[in-house]
Amino acid sequence: LPLTLIPFALTGGELVIRKDLFPGLDFILVVDPLSVFMAIVSSAIGCLIVVYSLGYIHHEENQNEYYLMVLLFIGSMMGLVFSANLIFLYLFWEIIAICCWRLIGFYRLRDFVRKADKAFLVTFFGAVVMLLGFIQIYGQTHSFDLTQMRGTLIPGSAVFLILFGMFSKSATAPLHTWLPDAGVAPTTVTALLHAAVLVKIGVYAYARLFLSTFQIPPVWQQVIPILVVVSSLIAAGAAAVENDFKRLLAYSTVSQIGYIFLGFAVANEAGISGSLLFILMHGLAKAGLFLCAGIVIHATHTKDIREMGGLIKTMPLTAVAFLLCAFSVIGIPPFGGFFSKFLVIMGTVKAGQVGLAAIALFTAVLTMFYLLKAFSLVFLGEAKHPAPEKTPSMVAVVTVLAVASILAGIFVAYPMKLVNIATSQISWWYR
Amino acid sequence: MSPNLLLAPILLPAALAALFFLVPKGVRYVREVLSVAGSLALLYLAFDLFKAKALGFKAGWLGMGIDFDLRLYHFAGFILIGLAGFLVLISLYSTVKMKDSPRVREYYAYVFLSAALANGAVLSNNFVPLVFFWEGLLLTLYGLITLGGKEANRTAVKALIISGFCDFAMILGIGLLWSITGTLTLSEISVKPEGLAAASFVLMMIGAVGKAGAMPFHTWIPDAAIDAPVTFMAFMPAAFEKLLGIYLLARITLDLFHLEARTTMSIVLMTIGAATIVLAVLMALIQKDFKKLLSFHAVSQVGYMILGIGTGIPAGIAGGIFHMINHAMYKCGLFLSAGSVEHRAGTTELKKLGGLAREMPLTAAGFAVCALAISGVWPLNGFVSKEMVFHGALESGYKIFAVAAWVGAIFTFASFLKAGHSVFFGARSQEVPKVKESPAPLVIPILVLALLCITFGVYNKLPLTQFIQPILQGQAEAGTHLDFTAHALSLLNPVAGISILCLILALGLHLFGWKRGGKKAYLASEPVHHLPVLHSLYDLSEARVFDLYEQGVKFLKGLSLALFKLVDRPIDAFFEKVVTGAGLRLTGLFQKAHNGQYANYLAWCLAGLLAIVAVVSLAVK
């Protein structure tokens, strides 16, 4: 559906749909390039993951609940992306948290449910703190309507409270540890959480609130980049140590989210457009990586990368798809990840934060190190659990994602058009 | 000529690469014929473009000053010819050498993709496409090394991480340059390397010399010599990466930044160059494997180019660039002759080989010419370019660098005497069965390269005036004497005298070692190996203590472990233990409060009432 909105967004239009519920609490939808971009990315990747689920989940119990939750998940993501009222933003935010709680604990094992509780409690706690921030803003402006609040300078405490919510949702250190633990969920869910929906919410909210709507105090503009780069580095380090396939990838997500925040936080053209592009590219590549991991785990019945090996013989397509997606995450051209990472770095340097850019690039080297380590351990070397690729629909999806990563890189000019328009609209204060 | 033609050197090989990847493995000859024909077409195109002098192509790309901007000018055209020429020879060579490789489809695809990317990198006039093509080469680098077999993956990862590190450094440098100058178009940038710009210069330099394989970013090359196919060695580290790395280095020092002689940056570059020459050649000297020996020379020779360009003196710069093209020729020829030996004898270990000259006369002749050229023997091309570098180094006023270059020359010749002596000349070894000369497609490229070495040496006026002099025009101050051919390149001047003395010394060294080693040529370097200080250094480097990658990986592992153990886990423990613990404690407290006694609840109610009253009364006041 959001595809129909592309031409509209390309012209840079902004449409506001307003439905009065009761005073001060209108149901407002905003269709602008930023929201359309987000909606396209998450719904497209969500769609691919649902196709993959057909193969992955079809012999599990509770399938009805699974599909209900996944669709509700994607649906509320759409709601969140388009809504322009802080209260509705919060509502959709919580619906997502509930879906996510059910899905992480899908296998219903005692320990798994505990992990799901952890994820829910951390994100819920973050969200409540964020709500406090919203209320503080309301106290200042007497409105929850984002369209009316452009350019308001909000106090630092509100920034802190809201940021707390975003970081908890987008799994940024020190609120990130629930994300690796969430790896107990079915792999499709993990992919959905990481690539398409969940962690992108915090990032999106950042762009929507702190860039496009409010002005934040200059202190925070200095502090946030440092926070996110440190988070990115910590997560990369943790990923290099992990031996659990999915936890490794989860830490990698935390690390990449740091990049996206960094691009937004430096708040210049290159950084913002790099981050937007990053959302797309990371979505494609990370979904691909997780789904490849899903195929491997499904077939070998182990999650420890040290116990795998030599799988390139039996599952060549998965191996190649994994490698391609890994290259995209690392940021090697002609894959899409290159452009996004490049622009974020450029933006950071341009903002005068050379040291941070250097740390970010060092993180990229670490990324290269641990992803290639995972690749050689899982797919090369001696075969320990030879297992063929079975379900064609699953393999087809990862192939599509890998190919999409390449194509998105080669024909980067097309998504870039939308990104540039969104960027120029977000950074209205920049002009 | 239409500007769109500029896309052809990129799109043609890319299309061929896609085709090679799709053609099934069983189909014979199509691949071979197409690759040779395609690369010949590319060569023709390159000459055509070279004649066109200047062309520009521009299309919008990402916005924000990031355009797909290609620009052809003299230097780029020259490099294009070089790249295409090597592609022709390599594809001809591969028709035989790679025929039975199980992944022949991928091999051809990667080779031609590399050509496309390299052409793109040379033509780009905007940093973003430049980095796009430049880093894209990482991919083919990785792919080509993995073709070597099972053990090759380790080396491939190593190469990828080292080159990736260099490229990321370059990106940072480009970012800095962007924020300084505000533009990403190469032809518009021209700053002095001072302050921040100096940092940017150093970072971009790391990118360039890292690609060229200078110390300390070279350590994957000797590993790859063992693991990767020999055609890869002749193709990437010997030819393509040198051309690209030195091209970029020359661009950086000449166009983007004005490197002046006798400045700090110039000394930095010269130091890197000199250190690379001496250290790598010392490593090369003691190698016992033909390919590995060559690979260390591929590193050592980069030092001459960097030294030459780093002098900032026209003669030195021209010498460095000329050395680049010369080196690509003879090193490619040397690797190909090693491949030819491997093809027939099945091994490249010096110990097992010997006396092959009679059975493989053409390969031996090609090898001999190339080896003499790399050692800088008059009148071959290596002599000319090395002399120019010596002159440049002397003119810069820092004689120590010239001395280092001469020391390098001694050991270069000594190690090639050793290699040639053990492989082609000397006594016929018994370990290798009788062999024949390699088939024509293997021999022709070697001979062509050897012939070029002679031509460029004897008629050095031709390339120097045609190709290299125009590059420097506009760089040197007006009125500077740019006629290098008159630069006393005859045999009769003191500089050349010292060089010749070096060669004689090397011969003496070799003969001495040969006698001491019981007339076994492969032991000729042992006296040097066992020199007091050098010996312990050699042992350390055998243990890979100097390998920046090994140390870097250790560092990365340690850092990751520290981050994980000291930062990540405590945070997790905070949530798992402290938060849940505090929650339990709190609920426990409440639980205790509910003891079911009526009086107790009443007391709580009273206390609450009192508190409310107190608050209200305070508020009223």
Image (cartoon, rainbow, N blue to C red):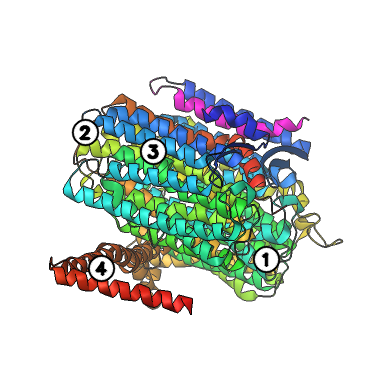
Asked if badge 1 and badge 2 are on a common chain, one would say no
Few, some or many residues within 10 Å of mark 4 (<14, 14–19, 20+): few
Q: Circle 3: is it few (<14), some (14-19), or many (20+) Cα within 10 Å?
A: many
Q: CA distance from mark 2 to mark 4?
A: 46 Å
| Residue hosting label 1 | B197
Q: Which residues are magenta?
A: B1-26
Q: Amino acid at mark 4?
A: Ala
Chain letter of mark 2 equals A
SS class, disc 4: helix
Q: Residue at x 27, y 33 (%)?
A: A65
Do pointers 3 and 2 mark residues of a single chain? yes
Q: Which residue is mark 2?
A: A387
Label drawn at residue A73: 3
Residue under mark 4: which chain is it in? B
Q: Amino acid at mark 3?
A: Phe
Badge 4 is on which residue? B582
- Label 1 neighbour load within 10 Å: few <14, some 14-19, many 20+: some
